[in-house]
Image (spheres, rainbow, N blue to C red):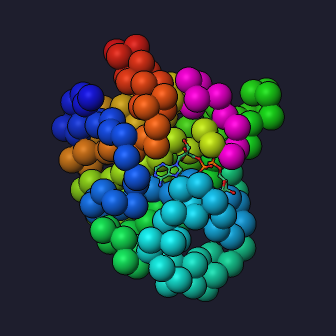
Amino acid sequence: MEQQFGTGRLVLVEGDITTIAADAIGNAANAALAGGGGVDGAIHRAGGPEIMAELRSRHSYGTPAGTAVSTGAGALPARWVIHAVGPVWRGGDHGEPVQLAGAYRSALSIAAELGARTLTLPAISAGAYGYPLDDAARIAVATVADSLRAGAPLEWVTFVLFSPRALAAFEHALLAFR
Ligand code: APR
């Protein structure tokens, strides 16, 4: 499913984000930028050790939830990886919605600064960090759609969802977003 917002397209696909070519690939990282499981683990496995080496040398202090940093992409089909840190779900009244939107906004603005024309993104915080999927999808779609409408210089932004259930949640969010 996809929809045009401004001059950019918001696209939803099911798949493994490490196998889809884009100028920039989004990662769901932790604040320590220490690597881990989930999409973070997949990106480091597929991209190779140079990604972690660059995180250690350029971003050794990590980055807080709601922000992102970029590195090269190693062996991945991309020029950059944008490591965005979402919030850990703690019930919803600890600023999680604002931090999740911030993680996506940071990733979009870094992509624009880098000159990326295409960007893939995972469902940040919707895995190990426990963010309820439907709420995470609604925030993800709204944040990206608003940025594209506001003129973010991206040809497309594709959410790569790792299960039919996640894809369905994002499709529902996109249909509800007008
Ligand atoms: N491609 C696309 N999406 C993926 C992939 C993949 N290869 N692997 C997992 N996902 C999906 C998950 O199914 C989930 O929907 O990414 C979404 C985010 O889940 P996590 O990767 O667990 O990320 P998050 O919930 O943000 O938790 C981040 O987990 O892996 C650690 O180091 C990471 O500490 C950090 C925390």
Residue at x 40% of width, y 52% of height: 16
Q: Where is residue 135 in the image (x, y as percent from the top left)?
A: 59, 25
> Is residue 83 at least partly visible in the picture?
no
Query: Based on the displayed image, in which of its 4 quarters is residue 33 positioned?
Result: bottom right
Q: Position of residue 92 (x, y in %)?
A: 75, 27
Query: Based on the displayed image, in which of its 4 quarters is residue 94 positioned?
Result: top right
> Is residue 137 at least partly visible in the picture?
yes
Residue at x 67% of width, y 59% of height: 30
Residue 28 vs 135, above or below: the answer is below
Is 77 part of what is drawn in magenta?
Answer: no
In the rendered structure, the answer to whether residue 137 lies left or right of residue 98 reads left
Residue at x 44% of width, y 74% of height: 47
Q: Position of residue 119 (x, y in %)?
A: 33, 53
Q: Position of residue 161 (x, y in %)?
A: 43, 41
- Look at the image and give the residue range highlighted in magenta: 128-136
- For the image, the number of numbered tags is 0
Residue at x 79% of width, y 28% of height: 91
Residue 163 vs 72, above or below: the answer is above
Give the camera-side residue of 120 and 60.
120
Q: Which quadrant: the C terminus?
A: top left
In the rendered structure, the answer to whether residue 86 lies left or right of residue 45 reads right
Residue 72 vs 106, above or below: the answer is below
Residue at far front of view: 164
Q: Which quadrant: the N terminus?
A: top left
Query: Based on the displayed image, in which of its 4 quarters is residue 73 positioned?
Result: bottom left
Give the camera-side residue of 54 and 108.
54
